[in-house]
Image (tube, rainbow, N blue to C red):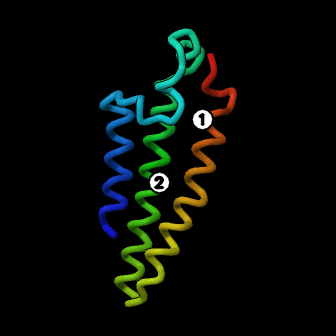
């Protein structure tokens, strides 16, 4: 289960610092004109922050499950991270904040 937060952190780093914008859904299929209408650096920063936040929630769940000897907490944390993180990322990245 420790691989999940590692994957989240890697995706965040690759998108923000590796400039692998093709990992952002829909951006790869846009024309150059449409891509120019979006602040991709801002969206990449948002994605990095959300991925780091999701990784943090999963790590807290892992630590809690080890301390309490109840493995259910790690799955609850993963579910919580996904249920909150993904809609937040979708709503914020599609807001007018990142349109030029």
**Which numbered dot is residue 46?**
none
Disc 1, SS: helix
> Would you place residue 2 above or below residue 28 in this image?
below
Q: Is residue 61 left or right of residue 79?
A: left
Quadrant of the snapshot with the N terminus: bottom left
Distance from disc 1 to disc 2, alpha carbons, whole Å, reads 16 Å
> Would you place residue 32 above or below residue 12 in this image?
above
Residue that extends furthest to the top in the rendered view of this protein: 33
Disc 2, SS: helix
Residue at x 54%, y 20% (from the top left corner)? 30
Residue at x 42%, y 79% (from the top left corner)? 64
Residue that extends furthest to the front in the rendered view of this protein: 29
Residue in front for this viewpoint, 88 or 56:
88
Q: Is residue 87 left or right of residue 9?
A: right
| x and y, in percent, of residue 99 in the image | 63, 21
Q: Is residue 30 left or right of residue 63?
A: right
Residue linked to disc 2? 53
Image marks 1 and 2: residues in contact by CB distance under 8 Å: no
Figure label count: 2
First in sequence: mark 1 vs mark 2:
2
Residue that extends furthest to the right in the rendered view of this protein: 96
Residue that extends furthest to the bottom in the rendered view of this protein: 69
- When asked about the image quadrant of residue 59, the answer is bottom left
Residue at x 42%, y 88% (from the top left corner)? 70
**Which numbered dot is residue 93?**
1
> Dot 2: within a 10 Å radius of its alpha carbon, few (fewer than 14), some, or many (20 or more) residues?
some
| x and y, in percent, of residue 45 in the image | 46, 34
Which of discs 1 and 2 lies nearer the camera? The answer is: 1
> Dot 1: within a 10 Å radius of its alpha carbon, few (fewer than 14), some, or many (20 or more) residues?
many
């Amino acid at each position: 289960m420790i691989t999940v937060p590692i994957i989240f952190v890697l995706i965040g780093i690759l998108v923000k610092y590796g400039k692998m914008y093709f990992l952002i859904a829909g951006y790869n299929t846009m024309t150059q004109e449409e891509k120019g209408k979006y602040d991709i650096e801002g969206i990449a920063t948002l994605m990095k922050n959300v991925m780091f936040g999701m990784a943090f929630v999963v790590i807290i769940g892992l630590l809690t499950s080890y301390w309490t000897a109840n493995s259910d907490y790690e799955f609850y944390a993963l579910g919580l991270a996904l249920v909150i993180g993904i809609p937040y990322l979708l709503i914020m990245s599609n807001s007018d904040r990142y349109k030029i």
